Amino acid sequence: MPRSSTTTLPLIEPVVPQRLERPFDDPAWVFEPKYDGFRGLLYVTRRDCHFRSKRGNVLRRFQDLCHWVREELPVKEAILDGEVVRGNLHYAAFDALWVNGRDLRALPLTRRKRVLQRVVQATSTALSQVFTMEGRGCDMLRAAERLDLEGIVAKRKPDPYGPDAVWYTIRNQAYTQRRDAGSCSAGRDGAGRPSLRPSRSLS
């Protein structure tokens, strides 16, 4: 198994979603907002931390954020998957792949998310957990459209993390923001960060 050159953790190939044109509802799937940020796997050990892009490159421009996130993690070793959200800069995690020596990739998505919930502290300012909605992709896309987010991601609940996982991205066709604008237009939470929950009722 390949190892990171700067840590003792394995290098993990991220799951890449396929494009899908229309949203759908299905109780066997979960749906998450998709931000126009930078996809990054977070590698943390006692001595080091860094983000890696989906192509495996170290994202050195976010090194300060990486150290900030490490200070807020209650574990000594982890690999998380998520996105560096621009604007009020923070890391929005949506998956836990490795925690304190335990490889979680063979677990179903729903179990990995429960582990992630224990890793992400409610009081954290540099790290947040991406909001997840079960079964209601059409409602999630409507919320993304109201918040002017890039779109949503659909993930099958029982899948492990790896080449057998099925993920889809569904774009918000009315999306108006651009990455080079340097800000995130999502709703804001009490700390001024982009809100991970829709700002209005989904019902």
Image (tube, grey):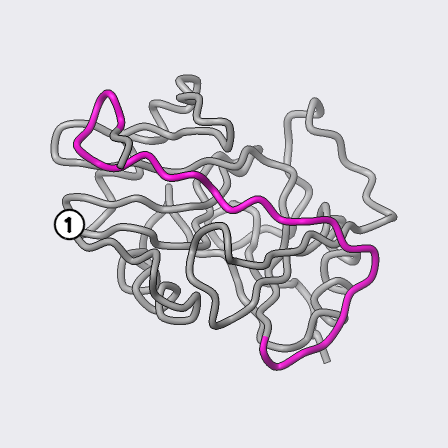
User: Dot 1: few (<14), some (14–19), or many (≥20) neighbours within 10 Å?
Assistant: few
User: x, y percentage for residue 54?
Assistant: 50, 33
x 26%, y 37%: residue: 1
Q: Is residue 27 magenta?
A: yes
Would you say the magenta stretch is mainly helix, strand or loop? loop
Q: What is the magenta range?
A: 4-28
Regarding mark 1 in the picture, which secondary structure is present there? loop
The three-letter code of the residue at mark 1 reads: Gly
Q: Position of residue 131 (x, y in %)?
A: 52, 62
Query: Left of 179 or right of it: where is 112?
Result: left
Residue 14 is covered by the magenta coloring: yes
**Residue at numbered disc 1:** 101
Check the image and report above or below for 145 versus 70. below
Could you tell me which residue is drawn at 64 percent across and 25 percent down?
182
Return the residue found at the far top.
Answer: 60
Q: Is residue 202 left or right of residue 161?
A: right
Q: Residue furthest right?
A: 174
Q: Whole-percent x and y of residue 24? A: 76, 71
Q: Residue at x 59, y 60 (%)?
A: 32
Where 180 sits versus 157, above or below? above
Up the image or down, 12 lies above or below 59; here it is below
Quadrant where the image shows the C terminus: bottom right
Side (left or right) of 92 relative to 139: left
Position in image of residue 41 (x %, y %) = 40, 38
Residue at the location (75% across, 30% down)?
A: 178
